[in-house]
Amino acid sequence: MKPLPPLIREDGTKNERIVALVADLGNDETKKKTGDALVAVATRLDSEEWLAKQRPLVEESNRRAKTNATAEQVKDQLKKYQEQELEKTFSSMRRIGGKTIVDYCLQYAMIGAKAEESRVRAIAAVEGRLDKSVGAQLDKVFEIVREDKNADKIRALALARLGEFPREQFVPKLYTLFEGKKWQVRMDAARMILRASTSKDIAEFMRRLPHSDKQKMALTEPIVYGSIVASMQGPPPG
């Protein structure tokens, strides 16, 4: 297994097969080296240098296909090609895991300028791979959830990752979202809190909800919260 990680390259045709072998049979050291190699590949793929290198190949492909692509169209083709290659790499990262991969994927997902689908795949790649003892990972996931500019798909997936941490770690962070102006964000956070709670936690939840004219709940919120509370385990609050 030791000779396999160095064979993982940006232009490698057997990267996925190598990753499959390492994931199934490799020891911790080999998996770490494979993770390092995948991060190195992703870093090169996600660069202007890689795009410049692929441009002549795309233009030649257009000529052979007798496609009169404009400069803007070629740019779009390159971006799609880049996203496809990154998709394969994120898929491989998901199989290997490890701190190097998790740190890279979370940092990538935090960058708003990256393609939405690539950011989604980066968050998906760390499913079940987060280290509950590393506060920096929790903070990065929550930062993705908290950022209003992020697409709903990205925030929803980040919320799912946040839910992989122990309740006592993520609930205090989610309560801070109750202070914002967007009721939809509060409702998503509230759903997650309630689903991780029992009836003994309801009193605290109620205290956290808006109680002033400056910050009102949407009409649908009480209905949503009530339905979740009704299905809770434990004695009803009294």
Image: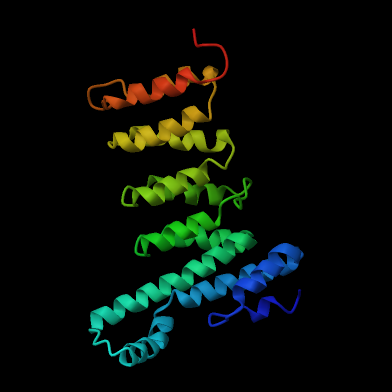
Q: In which quarter of the image is residue 68?
A: bottom left
Q: Which of 189 and 173 is in front in this view?
A: 189
The spot of residue 146 in percent (x, y) is: 39, 45
Judged left or right of residue 46, residue 127 is right
Residue at the image position 44 percent from the left and 74 percent from the top: 46
Whether residue 175 appears in this view of the structure is no
Q: Relative to 77, say whether 25 is above or below.
A: above
Q: Which of 216 and 67 is in front in this view?
A: 67
Judged left or right of residue 213, residue 177 is right
Whether residue 33 appears in this view of the structure is yes
Q: Relative to 195, say whether 45 is above or below.
A: below
Residue at the image position 52 percent from the left and 65 percent from the top: 90
The spot of residue 175 in percent (x, y) is: 43, 32
Q: Which of 138 and 159 is in front in this view?
A: 159
The spot of residue 102 in percent (x, y) is: 57, 58
Q: Which residue lies furthest to the front in this view?
A: 65
Residue at the image position 49 percent from the left and 55 percent from the top: 123
How many marks can you see?
A: 0
Q: Relative to 70, say whether 131 is above or below.
A: above
Q: Which of 74 and 145 is in front in this view?
A: 74
The spot of residue 223 in percent (x, y) is: 34, 22
